[in-house]
Image (cartoon, helix red, strand yellow):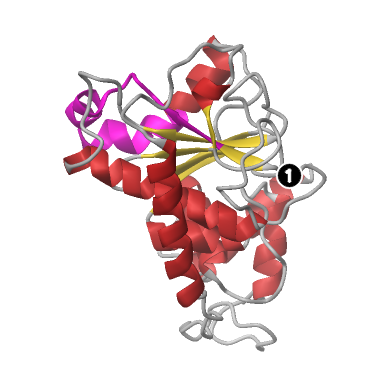
Amino acid sequence: MTFLAHPTHYTRDEFRALIAGVKIGAWTPAFPTLHNTGTPSLAQWKSYGATPQERWGASLNHYYQNQLGWHSGPHFVCCPDYIWHLCDLAADGVSVSCWNHLTLGVEMVGNFEVGGDDFSSGDGAKVRDNAAFTLAVLCEKFGWDPERYETGHSGLHFHHECARDGHPCPGSKVVKPDMIERVKAVLGALKANPLPAPPPPKIPAGYAIPGAHQCRAEVLSIEDIQSALDRLGAEPALAVNGVYDAATQAAVKRFQATHNCDADGWVGPQTTAALKAALGAGSD
């Protein structure tokens, strides 16, 4: 199974930092495939309210895994306000039968067929722009050219190009040349604004500082924190590099949220004790 234990949604900046830190193993995707949900439509999505939307990624993974029996699902889903990461990038997903083992699936929330949601304004345009950003970040990561299209081999794919599935997805309102131009525009902006090296973390005394001696409380080095989170199943796996970057802080917050710690993203005495306890429990 390649469903994330804790699917998480990200802002654009958080998503770019997440993807930049991802390590790809034996499986490397060749191109992205764009989809839309159809159901929920944007009207249905908005009617859910904030709390169900916060839980939606985990619910979707549960549906794919337990009701459909899939080993995975689409890797990402773009909503009006953020981008969901649902499945492990180190393994293939399930989103299109013609080339599941070659592609990353990117879903857009909404019904973008004629008579459905507007794709050019309002929340539909927000979904569109988050999808273009997601695709551009993936192109930046993997060196893809969205224009170099060869069916089943390279370039931006739409689900309806898989004749076997017979899906109209991502919808007739989604025009490939327009999406490619949007992706290229975002790529240009990303190249003009490369990710800076993360600054040294501002961590109070007694917290994790690489190479530090003990202060007011037992401390863990950043390498130890990253290694511990990896052993406890961090998704995606962290680079053990001693840099307290956005991916490490996000993984700490996810650990804290599930271990009754204050989810502030810093490893103080409370979180240190919880990490040691979790590691001890895993060694039984």
Asked if residue 60 shows in the view, the reply is yes
Instruction: Name which residue lies at 20% across and 18% down.
Output: 115
Instruction: Name which residue lies at 35% across and 20% down.
Output: 38
Closest to the observer, 248 or 196: 196
Principal secondary structure, stretch drawn in magenta = helix
Q: Would you identify the image quadrant in which residue 55 lies?
A: top left
Residue closest to the far right = 26
Closest to the observer, 16 or 116: 116
Q: In this rendering, would 13 be left or right of 24?
A: left
- Residue pointed to by mark 1: 282
Q: Would you identify the image quadrant in which residue 75 lies?
A: top right
Residue 62 falls inside the magenta stretch: no
Q: As displayed, is residue 161 above or below residue 192?
A: above
Q: As displayed, is residue 61 above or below residue 165?
A: below
**Mark 1 crowdedness (10 Å alpha carbons): few <14, some 14-19, many ≥20:** few
> Residue 222, position in %: x, y?
64, 74
Q: As displayed, is residue 161 above or below residue 214?
A: above
> Residue 268, position in %: x, y?
51, 71
Instruction: Name which residue lies at 22% across and 27% down.
Output: 117
Residue 56 falls inside the magenta stretch: yes
Q: Give the range drawn in magenta.
A: 33-58
Q: Which kind of residue does numbered mark 1 sit on?
A: Gly
> Residue 152, position in %: x, y?
68, 31
Mark 1: secondary structure: helix
Q: As displayed, is residue 254 above or below residue 102?
A: below
Asked if residue 263 shows in the view, the reply is no
Count of marks placed on residues: 1
Rendered-image quadrant of the N terminus:
top right
Closest to the observer, 37 or 169: 169
Q: In this rendering, would 33 be left or right of 262?
A: right
